Image (spheres, grey):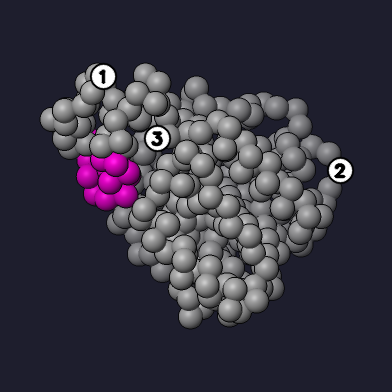
Amino acid sequence: MKKENISSEIYNLYDEYCHTQMSRREFLSRASTITVVGGSGLAMAQALLPRYAEAQTIKFTDERIKPKYIEYDSPGGTSGTMGGYLVTPTSDGPFPAVIVVHENRGLNPYIEDVARRLGVEGFLALAPDGLFPVGGYPGNDDDGKVLQQSLDPNKLFTDMLNSAHYVKNHKASTGKLGAVGFCYGGGVVNQLAVTMGADLNAGVPFYGRAADTEDVPKIQAPLMIQYAEDDPRVNAMREGYEKALKVNNKNYVMYSYEGTRHGFHNNSTPRYNEKQAKIAWERTIAFFKEHLG
């Protein structure tokens, strides 16, 4: 089903499903009761569910990279140990490092693919799995969402912070660190900028929760903040965040992408906007190359 044929009511219900405890069964059941023009609400809802196998852009066997799953210490986190997906370029290092922070459902195949995309661009990329301490990404987003909601958010953030320090100090790293994240991960990038200060060299949050305005003075990293045009929940925080960044003379740029919804970079569902995602990603890579080397 073409994305332009999907009702805005179904898109809005899907956003609620993604960000609440709503189960897949309830999502599909509620969609089936919505009267829509040009099709079935149920069929539209089913079309929005992710199809990861079709969305892979860089194969894990790509000769330009060496991906592997790793484990490392994470004191103060959920369990004291973390795991993630480390992608190292096969060219001669060291490499500038980037942490890739997942959405609110763990390290799914889309986020692994994003790490590989960074790897082929010459970055040492680590995509941590916040669910690793409780068994890891369970193979589907529904269970992943429930698992992530069950975690202590402060300990989960500590695991992400420890992951950032781990990849920054990795033997294959130049010591320069960037951070990119999506949805929940976008909010983590903003918070990493607050917490890490000068230890973070560049941050690119995609449609994530803004940092608290009173914490903005602590930010030292340049930020490229990416917004979807139609994303009321996240965009409600934008004005206050931008005002605080301006008042505190922070180095930042904000972009809003025309015709997009929350999740427009994720190419596994019809929310994906190919044209705008390409622009946003090209800007992201250029930003990292400018600030990380």
Cβ atoms under marks 2 and 1 closer than 8 Å: no
* CA–CA distance in space, label 2 to label 1: 54 Å
Residue drawn 47% across and 56% down?
208
Question: The N terminus is located in which quarter?
Answer: top left
- Magenta-drawn stretch contains 16: yes
- The kind of secondary structure the magenta stretch mainly shows is helix
The residue at which mark 3 appears reads as 139
* CA–CA distance in space, label 2 to label 3: 34 Å
* CA–CA distance in space, label 3 to label 1: 33 Å
Q: Position of residue 12 (x, y in %)?
A: 29, 41
Which quadrant of the view contains residue 204? bottom right
Which residue is at the front of the view, 40 or 162? Answer: 40
Segment colored magenta: 12-25
Q: Position of residue 157 (x, y in %)?
A: 47, 64
Residue kind at label 2, given as amino acid type: Asp
Residue 246 higher or lower than 280, as above or below: below
On residue 9, the disc is none
Circle 2 residues within 10 Å: few <14, some 14–19, many ≥20 = few
Question: The C terminus is located in which quarter?
Answer: bottom right
Residue drawn 63% across and 60% down?
253
Residue kind at label 3, given as amino acid type: Gly
Q: From the image, state whether disc 2 or disc 1 is nearer to you.
A: 1
Which quadrant of the view contains residue 38? top left
Residue kind at label 1, given as amino acid type: Gly
On residue 38, the disc is 1
The residue at which mark 2 appears reads as 92
Circle 1 residues within 10 Å: few <14, some 14–19, many ≥20 = few
Which quadrant of the view contains residue 2? top left
